[in-house]
Image: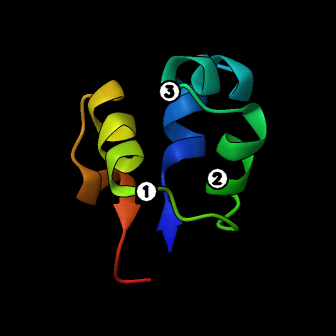
Amino acid sequence: MKNAVRALRAQAGLSQADLGAAMGVSRQTINSIETGRYLPSLPLAISLARYFESTVEEVFDVES
């Protein structure tokens, strides 16, 4: 599944560690989500979308 987390994070000027701290997860978790090695839980996906004032569908491409 592709996602826009890296682009949104960079646009916001955040490091992976910053975003991880805001989400209550590790920097490694954010890295794994960005590279597609880890699919976040539904609550985490919703939290990421809300953090970026977006929808889950805009952040995560379920068609891929």
Q: Position of residue 62 (x, y in %)?
A: 35, 75
Q: Distance between the Cα atoms at labels 1 and 2?
A: 14 Å
Position of 22 with respect to 57 (left or right) is right
- Kind of residue sitting beneath label 3: Met
Q: Is residue 14 left or right of residue 35?
A: left
Q: Amino acid at mark 1?
A: Ser
Q: Quadrant of residue 46?
A: top left
Which one is in front, 29 or 2? Answer: 29
Query: As drawn, is 27 to the left or to the right of 2?
Result: right
Tell me, for residue 23, which label it has, or none. 3
Q: Please rate how many residues cluster around mark 1, counting C-alpha atoms within 10 Å: few if below 14, some from 14 to 19, many from 20.
A: few
Q: Nearer the viewer, mark 1 or mark 2?
A: 1
Q: Residue at x 55, y 25 (%)?
A: 24
Q: Quadrant of the C terminus?
A: bottom left
- Residue at the (39%, 37%) spot, across then down: 48
* Residue 4 x %, y %: 48, 51
Disc assigned to residue 34: 2
Residue that label 1 marks: 41
- Numbered disc 1: secondary structure: loop
Q: Give the image location of residue 58, x and y in percent.
A: 28, 54
The Cα–Cα distance between marks 3 and 1, rounded to whole angstroms, is 12 Å
Q: In the image, what residue occupies the spot 27% across and 52% down? A: 56
Q: Secondary structure at mark 2?
A: helix
Q: Residue furthest right?
A: 28
Q: Residue at x 52, y 45 (%)?
A: 5
Q: Mark 2 and mark 3: span between their CA atoms?
A: 14 Å
Relative to 41, does residue 52 appear above or below in the rendering? Answer: above
**Amino acid type shown at disc 2:** Glu
First-in-chain label (3 vs 1): 3
